[in-house]
Image (cartoon, coloured by chain):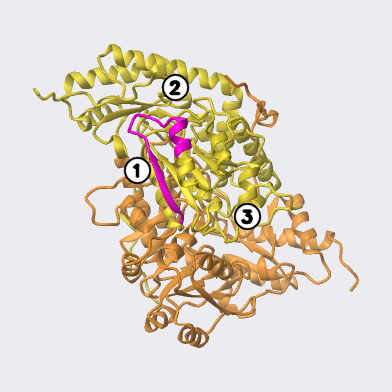
Chain colours: A orange, B yellow
Amino acid sequence: MSSLSVPPPKRLQKPLAVPYRHMFGPGPSNVPSRILLAGANPVIGHMHPEMFEIMNDIKSGIQYLFQTKNSMTLAVSGTGHTAMECAIFNTVEPGENVLTAVNGIWGERAADMAERIGARVNTVVAPPGGFLTNEEIEQALSKYRPALFFLTHGESSTGVLHPLDGIGQLCHKYNCLFLVDSVASIGGAPLYMDQQEIDILYTGSQKVLNAPPGTAPISFSERACKKIFNRRTKPVSFFLDLKWLANYWGCDDKPSRVYHHTGPISAFYTLRESLAILVGEGLENSWERHEKVAEYFHAGLESMGLKLFVKDRTARLPTVTTIVAPHGYDWKEITTYIMKTHNLEISGGLGPSVGLVLRVGLMGFNSSKANVDMVLEALKDALKHCHKSKV
Amino acid sequence: MSSLSVPPPKRLQKPLAVPYRHMFGPGPSNVPSRILLAGANPVIGHMHPEMFEIMNDIKSGIQYLFQTKNSMTLAVSGTGHTAMECAIFNTVEPGENVLTAVNGIWGERAADMAERIGARVNTVVAPPGGFLTNEEIEQALSKYRPALFFLTHGESSTGVLHPLDGIGQLCHKYNCLFLVDSVASIGGAPLYMDQQEIDILYTGSQKVLNAPPGTAPISFSERACKKIFNRRTKPVSFFLDLKWLANYWGCDDKPSRVYHHTGPISAFYTLRESLAILVGEGLENSWERHEKVAEYFHAGLESMGLKLFVKDRTARLPTVTTIVAPHGYDWKEITTYIMKTHNLEISGGLGPSVGLVLRVGLMGFNSSKANVDMVLEALKDALKHCHKSKV
């Protein structure tokens, strides 16, 4: 018999201590008590009939959130990145062409993921803070003839809400599937999966939905399913194989569900609760609230003399605002000061916007005029107290 | 402007209702209130310093649980299957040989995963309820010359605790990495990652640890890291790429952590709490308790005239017990009766044991003589009331 060579770590003898923060960065957002408490319900089995009912509730809630009648609608057991890989792994076979719209970090990551599984990837690039016209997209579709086109609806790294109208139709003209990342936007800005002919749409739980991170709603159109279920090769991931997930979520025509994996039970409770809150408010009310609050916020910023990074008003993401990093200041000093003095998270740039912007996320129940006032106060205070160079 | 074509679903207007169950199947197990409440703490940022401290706590706890000094120790943001893919995706390149020990469902799944990424897979098969000798394993290693050998320590589908001593040394003799699945066993049965020369070890949160499903501890030896960080190809998954995960978990030598993905914050709280409870009890005490309770349970079953599926006493998993399906009964009627009448989950077989066994899991804080008595009562009651054929 061996003996223990690694002693019990002292650091785990201290109790868990978690501070409360105003989570006004690009996510995760604050989680209301109602959702946190839903997650503290007892754990039941992943194959119990009550769990299947909860999963059916979630499915209905996602169909409403996404505005889709797709029966292939479910939540991936993972974060937004898992859903992103689920979308790409299932729809793309090695050697196929993939086109990604790069207007921030997410398009780059989608390209990376597609390359790893042997796709031939091309990109069509918009300047940071800008977006692509339908003409530019059609040109790229016609040039590269991709099997899949990836676009981010709410580009949280640059603060752009990309227009969606007409792009699904263009993709289908070129026999291409249309994949949209709506992690930062869904629930906070209008999106109509079916009417806009989006083939694969996914999001995360921790933004407008205000649930903890760890589950990721996703939906597939019939057109997408047709391609997926007629693949020549198996997707690289067993865990994300849609054939298995479809059965686990009761989306196929099999008489019963077989064990695939153990879903994150508690996280499903919180996702269900967050969808129930959205249904209670109504999707259009939520869109309108985010729009009004964003307008109020943007006006407040401009009246302080700050500039918005996205020039085109109609392309400003109502959930995540990018502010041009104030001239003469160190952006890092500002975010650190605000965290320390106001217990409030705002963040710097990401990917192409690093050093260029401050990012403020007001998502879901965080999107209120009272919170805008709090952020504006904190920014004013920071600009007064942080070092300004004499440039 | 479009209008909503999918109305708010009525089913989400009903409040979430979750029953309490005695979770005595092969997992998930019951989650104690202390852990559920830890998960209800406010959500903070995935890159906040307090979060990195919590992740460091988790890392220490896993090192203790696994009995390893590996710095490459972390929790995957997903369930056990995600960790399984993380292990295989990172260690195996297309065209390499993989050997999996199949003594239940997990070896089959590992083989499936490795095949999907282009490995050449061979299996070495033990009969259900049995295990492989070191001689059989050496023979297979010498015949197939794999880069990776997969073995399940606690085979929850058949109830076998596979011996581990000497296998790591054999693997290394043949220049092969040793990957062990300890989802159903770790914390409930002795395992010494470093001393037993295991190169990659993973588990799930929802078994002996009694946390909700959704996080998966994993650790890599230096030998494993050497192979992983000298790959010619990128792993198929960006989300599970160990280069990124290592930085996110502070396991590399980079000065700072960069954004990779948003971890499941609340689930990390629960994982930390479950590891703190284990540290409080002490690993050896936990092993001993599981062993004593299992012996008490097995004696009780035999005194009822029931037979254990695993003949060799030393190879019986103390966490999940497989009972030969009682002769003349329909196993499904028994589990259904016990759930309905005793609010208690036990389950049937899985994979090669379907129809052959009943499975009872007593894991973590569920492993107590009081719970054994409850299960034995329920089984006696079921055998009295369920239909017996006159065969």
**Residue B377 image point, x, y percent:** 29, 17
Q: Nearer the viewer, residue A96 or A250?
A: A96
Determine the residue located farthest toward the left in the rendered image: B390
Q: Nearer the viewer, residue A23 or B133?
A: B133
Q: Is residue B137 magenta?
A: yes
> Which amino acid, mark 2?
Ser
Look at the image and give the residue range highlighted in magenta: B119-139
Please give the chain letter of the residue carrying mark 3.
Answer: B
SS assignment at label 2: loop
Pointer 2 local density, CA inside 10 Å: few below 14, some 14–19, many at least 20:
many
Residue placed under numbered mark 1 in the picture = A51
SS assignment at label 1: helix
Where B269 falls versus B308 (above or below)? below
Q: Quadrant of the C terminus of chain A?
A: bottom right
> Which amino acid, mark 3?
Trp
- Disc 3/disc 2 C-alpha distance (Å): 37 Å
> Which amino acid, mark 1?
Met
Q: Are marks 3 and 2 on the same chain?
A: yes
Residue placed under numbered mark 3 in the picture = B244
Circle on res. B367 = 2
Residue at image point 44% right, 27% down = B363
**Residue B183 image point, x, y percent:** 47, 36
Q: Nearer the viewer, residue A202 or A177?
A: A177
Please give the chain letter of the residue carrying mark 2.
Answer: B
- Disc 1/disc 2 C-alpha distance (Å): 24 Å
Q: Of marks 3 and 2, which one's residue comes earlier in the chain?
A: 3
Residue at image point 86% right, 66% down = A388
Q: Quadrant of the N terminus of chain A?
A: top right
Asked if the residue at tag 2 contacts the one at tag 1, i.e. Cβ–Cβ closer than 8 Å, the answer is: no
